Structures are given as structure tokens and as C-alpha cells.
Image (spheres, rainbow, N blue to C red):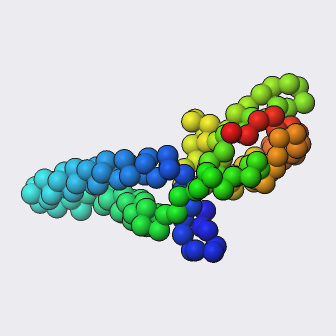
Amino acid sequence: MVDQQQGRTLLTAEGKRELEAKLPALVAQKREILERLQAVKTYGDAADGGEGSDAKDEIARLDRRINDIEHMLRHARLVDESERDGTVSIGCRVTVVDDAGDSEEWTIVVPAEANTRHRKISTQSPMGAALMGKRVGDRISVHAPAGDMVYAITAIE
């Protein structure tokens, strides 16, 4: 998510740490592929075949991801938790309950940090977008493939 006032990428402190930790691993992975590609090239035209082409595609993918992360980190503005006003915003952990009484907890993050396995949803996801700016007690409706779901916000941390 880009902060329109400052043209910077908004990140939570945790998200920034995760990106900083991910960067060296991606660089190392790229280096391994480059070394493997160099080894294949020593055997003649083999690098021009499938393995070389796959390696080049993977290097290009890694380059894009590395550049994206470096850009985000270079232009990051950390979300200031002291600015919270009781409404759902980036970095908040939100508990919602559906009409059946089932409870879910989500942390609201920018798209770069989203990871549903870790219960982190993007501000641009249907649920995240519906939650933004709401308060405890508010009800939201989220369009889902199975139909619209209604949730009540029971906690914001």
C-alpha cells in the first residue's frame, strides 16, 4: 500500500523485518542458480536447452522479487501504532464473529505482507477492505463465492 501523502510504501515493523530477512535468502538462491548455469555452460550448448532456459527464467523471477523488496524497503514508512484511533487500520489484529457464532482473527497488513496461513490479510482483500476504518461493534458484509457473509467486529488490538 502506498501512502499518498508521502509516496512511500506502508509497512508494519514486523513486515519490514520479514522482508529484510527474506532478501539475503533470495540473493543466495539467485547466486546458486547462476553457479549452476555456469557449470552447465561448461558442457557446451546444454545451457541453451531446457535447463538453461528454466534457470534464466528463475533468475529473472528472482531479480524482479529482489528489486521489489529493495524498492519497498528503500521507500518504506512504518505504520505508527500510536496513531491508532480505535478503528481497524494496518497492523491491527481484528476478531470477527459470523452469524453462526464462529470466530476468526486476522491481522490487517499491506498486500506485500499478506499471508493467509499466518492469518494476515491485505487491506485490498474483500475482508480486509471491509474491515478498514470500522470499530468494535460494527457489522460488515463480505462478498464471498458462497454468498455474502456478515460479521460483527468483537475486538481490535
Q: Is residue 75 above or below residue 129?
A: below
Question: How many numbered tags mark residues here?
Answer: 0
- Residue 56's x, y, as percent? 30, 61
Q: Quadrant of the N terminus?
A: bottom right
* Residue at figure coordinates x 83%, y 41% from the top left: 136
Q: Quadrant of the C terminus?
A: top right
Can see residue 121? no
**Which residue is found at the position 43% from the left and 48% from the top?**
17
In the image, what residue occupies the spot 47% across and 68% down? 75
In the picture as drawn, the residue positioned furthest to the left comes out as 42
The location of residue 111, given as percent across then percent down, is 59, 55
Q: Residue 49: which quarter of the image? A: bottom left
As displayed, is residue 100 above or below residue 77? Answer: above
Q: From this viewpoint, is residue 129 visible?
A: yes
Residue extending farthest front = 82
97 sits left or right of 41 in the view:
right
In depth, the one of 59 and 17 nearer the eye is 17
**Quarter of the view holding residue 96:** top right
Residue 85, x across and y down, in percent: 74, 52
Residue 31 placement, left or right of 143? left
Q: Residue at x 32, y 59 (%)?
A: 59
